[in-house]
């Protein structure tokens, strides 16, 4: 885990966020925080507004933000943007922890999963790939956390 080895005991829902400059994939856990499911794709310019509205209607206990790193572990062209988003989320939602989760290969894994489900034409649909990637990032976090 990127944030270190400390995990909080959370109750409610976790949001998974796969941030992109144009589109952001969103995933959510079940109330037991065991299974991550794709939710939707949000235009990145509308992300904060969407999260605020979702947080009002649902008990969001934490957010897991995909942390983009290159294969060798160095920052990518998106890493600084994700760190800025993390700071903005922490400022806007001070009582909601924001965790970083390594997202290397999540988009490729999402495309493969969609393809294996027999939805070849959807494997190239960026919106579907984004939200499935968010679910993979969130599920990886859950698996590392030991739920």
Image (cartoon, rainbow, N blue to C red):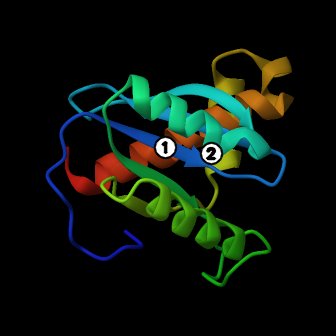
Residue designated by label 1: 16
Q: Position of residue 46 (x, y in %)?
A: 73, 39
Up/down of 96 relative to 113, above or below: below
Q: Judging from the image, what secondary structure is the residue with disc 1 in?
A: strand
Quarter assignment of residue 119: top right
Up/down of 119 relative to 85, above or below: above
As drawn, the label of residue 48 is: 2
Q: Judging from the image, what secondary structure is the residue with disc 2 in?
A: helix
Q: Residue at x 81, y 34 (%)?
A: 126
Q: Can residue 79 be seen at all in this image of the molecule?
A: yes
Q: Residue at x 30, y 56 (%)?
A: 144
| Residue nearest the viewer, comparing 52 with 85 | 52
| Residue nearest the viewer, comparing 140 with 2 | 2
**Distance from Cα at disc 2 to Cα at disc 1:** 14 Å
Q: Position of residue 64 (x, y in %)?
A: 44, 52
Apparent side of residue 27 relative to residue 78 in the rendered image (left or right): left
Q: Residue at x 34, y 30 (%)?
A: 35
């Amino acid at each position: 885990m990127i944030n270190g080895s400390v995990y909080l005991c959370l109750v409610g829902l976790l949001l998974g966020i796969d941030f992109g400059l144009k589109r952001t994939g969103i995933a959510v856990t079940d109330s037991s925080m065991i299974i991550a499911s794709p939710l939707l794709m949000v235009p990145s310019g509308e992300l904060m507004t969407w999260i605020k509205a979702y947080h009002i209607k649902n008990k969001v206990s934490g957010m897991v933000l995909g942390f983009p790193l290159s294969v060798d572990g160095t920052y990518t062209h998106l890493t600084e943007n994700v760190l800025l988003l993390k700071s903005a989320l922490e400022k806007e939602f001070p009582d909601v922890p924001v965790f970083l989760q390594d997202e290397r290969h999540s988009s490729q894994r999402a495309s493969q999963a969609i393809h294996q489900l027999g939805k070849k034409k959807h494997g190239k649909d960026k919106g579907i790939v984004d939200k499935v990637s968010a679910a993979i990032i969130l599920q990886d976090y859950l698996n590392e956390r030991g739920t």
